[in-house]
Image (cartoon, grey):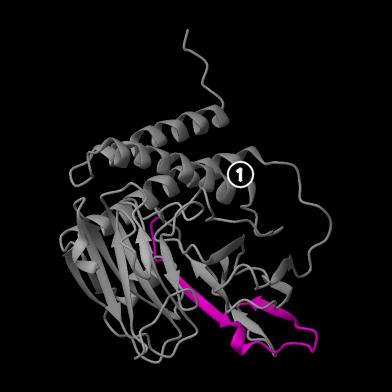
């Protein structure tokens, strides 16, 4: 007598768990670092991606009843996440129209982007529309409304395309002690009543999407890191088409690279920043997660950097404080990725890098 077939939701769960298991091969693949710290961070990274994937594709995946959630934060990070940024995401669909209501706040940069595609999923990936706060019509009290739709709209309009699937709100803070975050809320126009009960088929789709997200995100940025590692201690300009495909902000120009330092060495990064809304430099681990900025000074920005009299800066990456301005702490790591972003910059200077003996800095 044939064994009874398993319910579809049980099969979906098994496949999700098996996909997570397969994603672990990333930590052992050729090109991944072998130190106990890097390996432990790699497996922790996968647990973090799993948390984010379930939030994105199971808990907050219904574009008919959108709500904001955070897809990157202090303990879950993706692709050179900015320590100065407050990220919010919402599921949307080009078949619907939406309204975002908010209050501007005082952050130095506020941007709204609609995107299609997803890490790990087949098909195209990119930005369908972008609206920066400088282009918003604001009420005298700083409040605003934005309509998201495929059809053009008067006033504050954020374009979508039929396959648009996500809204990302980015807020960059120069000084958390003095700046106020924008307040935002989203609603679908024409919605009525609460969402229906959980659909088992939707759960199965969500679990499958979450599995693809974990594997696809991990592989995408591991590929980036391994490419950067071929040119250690250099910052190279990123192709804007590549960052756009990874759901980047079209107002950001990136220079990225890989740092690797012996105990007595320091990496010096020098540039003259252009006129811009914001810039920062940061250290990440191999998996392109920002180092733990809660406890270590691993990044600097337009406001916190000490400048030379000519307006240029010198940043110093080292394992211990050399007693000079703009020291960035490697936080117990001997290697990792790094990134410099110019936001709404008049031009995009390439930073200069060199490795020196730590004692030479004095």
The residue labelled by disc 1 is 202
- Residue 358 falls in image quadrant: bottom left
Question: Residue reaching furthest right?
Answer: 193
Give whichever of 58, 181 is nearer the camera: 181
Left or right, residue 45 beside residue 84: left
Left or right, residue 357 beside residue 117: left
Q: Residue 123 magenta-drawn?
A: yes
Residue 307, can we see it?
yes
Tell me which segment is drawn in magenta: 121-149
Q: Residue 103 magenta-drawn?
A: no
- Residue at x-position 34% and y-position 58%: 321
Give whichever of 282, 64 is nearer the camera: 282
| Image mark count | 1
Q: Secondary structure at mark 1?
A: helix
Q: Position of residue 350 (x, y in %)?
A: 26, 81
Give whichever of 314, 163 is nearer the camera: 314
On screen, residue 66 above or below 105 = above
- Residue 42 falls in image quadrant: top left
């Amino acid at each position: 007598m044939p064994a009874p077939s398993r319910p579809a939701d049980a099969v979906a769960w098994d496949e999700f768990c098996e996909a997570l298991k397969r994603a672990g091969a990333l930590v052992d693949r050729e090109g991944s670092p072998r130190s106990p710290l890097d390996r432990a961070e790699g497996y922790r990274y996968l647990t973090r991606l799993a948390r984010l994937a379930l939030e994105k594709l199971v808990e907050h995946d219904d574009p008919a009843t959108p709500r904001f959630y955070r897809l990157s934060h202090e303990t879950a990070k993706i692709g050179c996440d900015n320590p100065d940024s407050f990220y919010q995401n919402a599921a949307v669909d080009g078949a619907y129209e939406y309204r975002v209501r908010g209050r501007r706040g005082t952050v130095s940069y506020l941007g709204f982007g609609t995107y299609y595609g997803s890490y790990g999923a087949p098909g195209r990936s990119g930005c369908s529309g972008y609206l920066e706060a400088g282009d918003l019509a604001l009420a005298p009290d700083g409040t605003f409304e934005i309509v998201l739709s495929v059809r053009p709209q008067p006033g504050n309009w954020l374009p979508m395309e039929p396959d648009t699937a996500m809204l990302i709100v980015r807020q960059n803070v120069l000084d958390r002690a003095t700046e106020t975050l924008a307040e935002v809320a989203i609603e679908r126009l024409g919605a009525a009543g609460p969402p229906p009960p959980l659909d088992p088929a939707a759960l199965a789709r969500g679990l499958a999407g979450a599995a693809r997200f974990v594997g696809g995100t991990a592989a995408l940025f591991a590929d980036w890191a391994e490419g950067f590692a071929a040119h250690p201690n250099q910052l190279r300009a990123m192709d804007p088409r590549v960052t756009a495909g990874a759901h980047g902000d079209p107002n950001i120009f990136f220079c990225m690279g890989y740092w690797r330092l012996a105990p007595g060495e320091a990496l010096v990064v020098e540039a003259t920043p252009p006129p811009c809304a914001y810039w920062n430099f940061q250290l990440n681990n191999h998996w392109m997660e920002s180092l733990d900025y809660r406890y270590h000074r691993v990044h600097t920005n337009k406001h916190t950097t000490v400048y030379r009299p000519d307006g240029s800066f010198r940043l110093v990456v080292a394992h211990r404080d050399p007693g000079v301005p703009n020291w960035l702490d490697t936080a117990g790591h001997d290697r990792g990725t790094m990134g410099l972003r110019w936001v709404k910059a008049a031009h995009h200077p390439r930073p200069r890098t060199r490795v020196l003996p730590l004692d030479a800095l004095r």
